[in-house]
Image (cartoon, coloured by chain):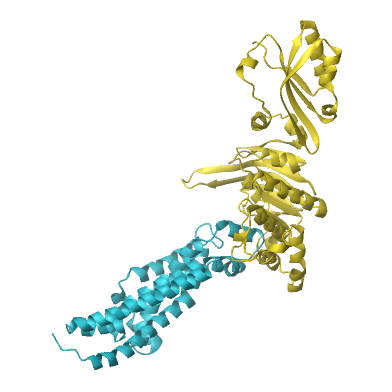
Amino acid sequence: MNETNYSELVSNLLPAFGETLEMCGIALALAILLGVPLGVLSYLTSDRNICQNKLINLLVSFILNVIMSTPFVILLVLLLPFTKLVVGTSIGPEAASVPLGIVAIAFYARLVEGNLHGVDKGVIEASIAMGATWFKIVTNVLLPGAFSGMIRGLTVLAVTLVGYSAMAGIVGGGGVGDLAIRFGYYRYQTDVMIITVLLLIGLVQIIQTLGEKASQKAQK
Amino acid sequence: MIKFNNVSVSFKDKKSQIVHAVKNVSFEVEDGEILGIVGTSGAGKSTLLRTVNQLQLPTGGQTIVDGNDIGSLSGAELAKARHSIGMIFQQFNLVSTKTVAQNVAFAMEIAGRSKEEIKQRVPELLKLVGLSERANVYPNTLSGGQKQRVGIARAVANNPKILLCDEATSALDPETTNDVLQLLKEINHKFGITIVLITHELDVVKKICQRVVVMNRGEVVEIGDVFDVFTNPQHEFTKTLLSHTFDLDLPDRLTHDYSKPLVRIVYNGEKAEDAIVSNVVKQYAVDVNILHGKIEYINDRPFGILIVQLIGEQDEIEKSLNYLSKNTYRTEVINERN
């Protein structure tokens, strides 16, 4: 077993923590920005719904399924050319944010869609009967109705992303998870592995607690 | 106001079987009336009602609303037509994330009313339905009756010409039902809104409707003045439907006692207020033993059923039966040996 240099560990841990937060933060932002509209689109175009459209619905569904069924490591590599195109580099935390963001968008779109399906159909029918446009229904009934569930979904997504970000090391993304693998696992520094994993558990706990609080507050 | 012109609705159910929910229905709803559509569940009444605001498109025929074939409208025209058709629901269907006032305001926002107009009208509407105090609470803190009042305020917010009620009182207890019906009657009276309500509760029809449409298996089997239909049903289905309200059950030992005639007297209208039974006792040498009875008031007109036993000499009984037949709506001996 290699001897652990604790001061080296601490000096590595801080930036790693920052990298994890950066990657997950960018991915979460992308999920909210693009995952929500995609989820809404998938919901609205679904069978017997407000803007029923089989073609769009199938297309969206297919894309989401492809993204979510491809193992993340493979997606990471497959997306390298695209990543380079978008952020100009294929290494580093920014580069890792691209595949992470794409997975987050797909994942969150599905969660949002599920939450929208949970909104009372009767209220939607009432809104249609009043002559509301689909946009009014989305902004006034659907999104507010699904809001609390969407926050819970965002919590699940954030926790999942922390896990996924560990694999970002493959493209030099860094992060706490990467540290755990590189130092703790490959260099047999069990204590480093334990410390980093504990750190990750702590992070997940914080996210979960905050998420639950926010979701409860949003519930009416 | 509304004209159903050979309206049919059929759709595929989950097993891909074609269901004919509404079959060739034709009738008209008059301006300003309260019309009830009754029938058992699955009779197609809800589907028919939904063709009025195109929540359901007819697969055959047309629903003409205020002179327009509603099925031919789409987009902005349809939205505009819907603004003048209010609707209330069994489950109220209020937006749970909006307060009472916001729910009512939402209906007006949809119709493109100005902020000032909304600000002015919402309190008026809440006053109309007696919920001024609860303007800023969320629907989940309201009772069923209060929720339906919000539903009514929302439905009439844009001064509609028509109000559709989809089993609007079916989730309410009898007392609350009465309050809500009273409110509907008031709204009909005050604003002249045509009300079409569907229900499986005959009591609701008796209380506020002028005319009734009886539906069975997607077809209209009877239509007419509520009093006429309820007191003199023509169709078998209507008779069965009404039998639950008007059949008076007697113990077998009485119906099987053939020595004394058991007479069912049905009386209605003005005659119900005459003292027919006491006249019989005075004029003929018979005793009248009242075994069962019920008086209903339909649109304030009395309709009663009495089951009596006539005790006396045979020819006196004949004479009194004769008198009764002449002076009541219907008189029949119900325990005759076949």
Q: Residue at x 21, y 82 (%)?
A: A191
Q: Which residue lies furthest to the left in this view?
A: A1
Residue B291 is left or right of residue A29, and the answer is right
* Relative to B28, residue B81 above or below: below
Q: In this figure, what is the number of numbered marks?
A: 0
* B55, B74: nearer the viewer: B55
Percent position of residue B131, x then y: 72, 60
Q: Which residue is drawn at 37% across and 71% down?
A: A67
* B79, B206: nearer the viewer: B206
Screen quadrant of the C terminus of chain B: top right
Q: Which one of the lettered chains is coloured yellow?
A: B
* Relative to B276, residue B217 above or below: below
Q: Which one of the lettered chains is coloured cyan?
A: A
Residue A17 is left or right of residue B4, and the answer is left
Q: Can residue A161 be seen in this view?
A: no
Percent position of residue B208, x then y: 75, 43
Residue B105 occupies which quadrant of the picture? bottom right
* B226, B80: nearer the viewer: B226
* Relative to B196, residue A105 above or below: below
Q: Which residue is drawn at 74% across and 58% down?
A: B130
* Relative to B194, residue B317 above or below: above
Q: Residue at x 81, y 35 (%)?
A: B301
Percent position of residue B43, x then y: 61, 40
* B227, A207: nearer the viewer: A207
Q: Can residue A14 be seen in this view?
A: yes
Percent position of residue B81, x then y: 71, 59
